[in-house]
Image (cartoon, rainbow, N blue to C red):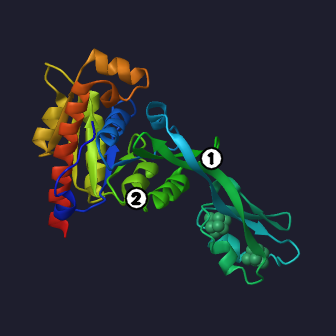
């Protein structure tokens, strides 16, 4: 069931990061990410959707490592503070205010830049660790799995994604990044170091609209990209038309298929259950790697 691409390391980057994205949830991003990871002989799966991770539901990994993710928050020593307000003038996020003769920190809007502690002439500001989430790694059969989760009430998952991707740096093989849906900051953080983006799209006008969003994001960030069309049927596909009109290479087509939908909705990795789906995803993976090799080879 595993796949090896001969000559891959000679032709392109040996450990490409491939980001899988879509303009909204439910398009098939995790279906594609999980099944491509599972048919590869060396790919690690990384769930960057840290506000709502779901890759583990399919891969059911046994976690072997866990790490708390924290950000730094400022702590003001009232005995040292002279009330000069230099820290408040410095903070571009309005996370500090001088109220009732003391500096007040609005933790929810602090971006943990550390600047206020640097500019304080009295060294009155220190920093403390503020836990905001967790990252995990482990194995699902022969597939290495990474995932992160942001604590409830935390404004942004970006620091968790950043830490998660730091951990993934040690991976030697292909890395499949299952990105958050949409085109927000967390998606930008997930794809910023990627070598190639796969845009997953559905066959509807709304699907084409969402495809356009992630297409523009990939272009804005200077990424190479191709598309995988999901739920393909016999009717005209507005997403396919969008790809053709915008010269987006279509890497693969996944058919509208009740059995695939049943496996997926039951949290089953389709390629581990059905040889036909394994063959289909192997073919898509081979086409993807060939495309990534061309792109990364032409970049060097
Ligand atoms: S760490 Fe940065 S964002 Fe937070 S309060 Fe200080 S200056 Fe503002
Ligand atoms: S810069 Fe330092 S001394 Fe000045 S108000 Fe801020 S904490 Fe107080």
Residue drawn at (17%, 38%), measured in percent from left and top? 283
Whole-percent x and y of residue 204? 24, 26
- Measured along the vertical axis of the image, is residue 261 above or below residue 40? above
- Quadrant assignment, res 58: top left
Q: Is residue 203 visible?
A: no
Where residue 298 sits, quadrant-wise, is bottom left
Give the residue at x 14% y 19%: 235
How many numbered marks, from 0 up? 2
- Quarter occupied by the C terminus: bottom left
Q: Which disc is residue 154 wearing? A: 1
Q: Position of residue 2 (x, y in %)?
A: 28, 40
- Residue contact between numbered discs 2 and 1, judged by CB atoms under 8 Å: no
Horizontal side of 2 relative to 249 (left or right) equals right
Query: In the depicted view, which residue is nearer to us: 158 or 264?
Result: 264
Q: Classify the position of ligand 1 by quadrant: top left, top right, bottom left or bottom right.
A: bottom right
Q: Specify the farthest residue to the top.
A: 258
The picture places residue 88, in percent across and down from the top left corner, at 69, 70
Furthest residue toward right: 79
Quadrant of the image containing the N terminus: top left
- Of mark 2 and mark 1, the one earlier in the sequence is 1
Q: Residue at x 22, y 61 (%)?
A: 9
Asked whether the viewer can see residue 17, the reply is yes
Residue farthest to the bottom, as pictured: 121
Q: Nearer the viewer, mark 2 or mark 1?
A: 2
> Does 283 sit above or below residue 174?
above
Q: Residue at x 16, y 51 (%)?
A: 291
Residue corresponding to mark 2: 171
Q: Is residue 235 left or right of residue 17?
A: left
């Amino acid at each position: 069931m595993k796949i090896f691409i001969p000559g891959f390391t000679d032709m392109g980057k040996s450990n490409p990061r491939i980001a899988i994205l879509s303009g909204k949830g439910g398009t098939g991003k995790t279906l594609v990410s999980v099944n491509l990871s599972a048919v590869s002989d060396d790919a690690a799966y990384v769930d960057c959707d840290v506000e709502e991770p779901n890759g583990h539901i399919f891969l059911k990994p046994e976690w072997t490592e866990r790490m708390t993710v924290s950000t730094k928050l400022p702590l003001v020593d009232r005995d040292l503070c002279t009330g000069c307000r230099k820290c408040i003038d410095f903070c571009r996020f309005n996370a500090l205010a001088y109220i009732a003769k003391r500096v007040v920190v609005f933790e929810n809007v602090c971006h943990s830049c550390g600047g206020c502690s640097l500019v304080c002439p009295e060294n009155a500001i220190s920093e403390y660790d503020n836990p905001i989430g967790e990252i995990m790694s482990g194995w699902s059969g022969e597939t290495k799995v990474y995932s992160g989760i942001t604590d409830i009430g935390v404004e942004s998952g970006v620091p968790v994604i950043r830490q998660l991707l730091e951990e993934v740096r040690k991976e030697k093989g292909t890395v499949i990044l299952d990105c958050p849906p949409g085109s927000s900051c967390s998606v930008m953080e997930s794809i910023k170091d990627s070598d190639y983006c796969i845009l997953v799209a559905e066959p509807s006008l709304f699907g084409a609209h969402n495809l356009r969003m992630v297409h523009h994001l990939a272009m804005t960030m200077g990424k190479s990209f191709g598309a995988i069309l999901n739920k393909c049927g016999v009717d005209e596909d507005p997403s396919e038309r969008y790809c053709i009109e915008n010269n987006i290479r279509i890497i693969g087509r996944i058919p509208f298929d009740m059995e695939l939908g049943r496996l997926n909705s039951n949290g089953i990795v389709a390629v581990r259950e059905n040889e036909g789906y394994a063959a289909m995803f192997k073919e898509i993976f081979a086409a993807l790697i060939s495309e990534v090799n061309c792109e990364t080879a032409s970049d060097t």
